[in-house]
């Protein structure tokens, strides 16, 4: 996870990405449902909103709030195919492969986990 953590730190230094944090309702969802369930939500959301070769409304398909996965997508530059290409070297124009989907979900889940203080992992 060292490479992933380094990449997340680099992405998090960008002013737009740095402003995203888990607060209020979004954090409560992780607290209430747990990281395993939120990861399943990420799998579903990525599968429908990001994985197709030409996602519907690409570049505008990810809301800024309403679920911790959405917040994490913006914070980690996994919100659209353009950001995936620029920050994660996953080119647009093809459906995400299983390893690419797994990578995106790992990035999102890792960011959510890092939002918790050390010694206070999400349940």
Image (cartoon, rainbow, N blue to C red):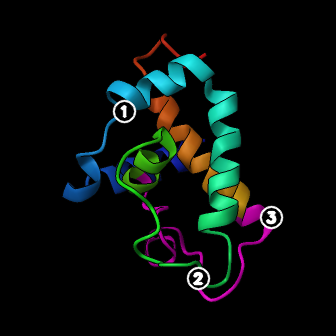
Quadrant location of the N terminus in the rendered image: top right
User: As displayed, is residue 38 above or below residue 83?
Assistant: above
Residue wearing tag 3: 98
Q: Nearer the viewer, residue 41 or 78?
A: 41
Q: Quadrant of residue 23?
A: top left
Name the residue at 51% across, 71% down. Answer: 84
Q: Callout 2 environment at 10 Å: few (<14), some (14 to 19), or many (20+)?
A: some
The verdict on residue 80 being magenta is: yes
Residue wearing tag 2: 91
Q: Rounded to the nearest whole Å, what is the CA distance between mark 3 and mark 2?
A: 14 Å
Q: Secondary structure at mark 1?
A: loop
User: As displayed, is residue 66 above or below residue 89?
Assistant: above
Q: Nearer the viewer, residue 61 or 4?
A: 61
Residue wearing tag 1: 22
Q: Rounded to the nearest whole Å, what is the CA distance between mark 1 and mark 3?
A: 27 Å
Residue 62 shows up from this direction:
yes
Q: Callout 1 environment at 10 Å: few (<14), some (14 to 19), or many (20+)?
A: many
The verdict on residue 120 being magenta is: no
Q: Badges 3 and 2: C-beta atoms under 8 Å apart?
A: no
Q: Residue 34's x, y, as percent?
A: 62, 22
Name the residue at 40% across, 46% down. Answer: 71
User: As displayed, is residue 74 above or below residue 65?
Assistant: below
Name the residue at 67% across, 70% down. Answer: 51
Q: Callout 3 environment at 10 Å: few (<14), some (14 to 19), or many (20+)?
A: few
The part of the chain drawn in magenta is 76-100
Please report whichever mark, 3 or 2, sits nearer to the chain's N-terminal start. Answer: 2
Please report whichever mark, 1 or 3, sits nearer to the chain's N-terminal start. Answer: 1
């Amino acid at each position: 996870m060292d490479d992933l953590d380094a990449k997340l730190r680099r992405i998090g230094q960008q002013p737009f990405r740095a402003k995203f944090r888990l607060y209020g309702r979004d954090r409560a969802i992780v607290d209430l449902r747990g990281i395993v369930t939120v990861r399943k939500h990420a799998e579903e959301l990525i599968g429908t909103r990001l994985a197709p070769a030409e996602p519907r409304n690409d570049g505008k398909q990810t809301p800024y709030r309403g679920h911790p996965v959405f917040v994490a997508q913006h914070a980690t530059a996994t919100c659209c195919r353009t950001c995936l290409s620029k920050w994660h070297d996953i080119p647009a124009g093809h459906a995400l492969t299983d390893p690419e989907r797994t990578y995106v979900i790992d990035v999102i889940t890792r960011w959510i986990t890092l939002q918790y203080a050390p010694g206070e992992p999400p349940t």
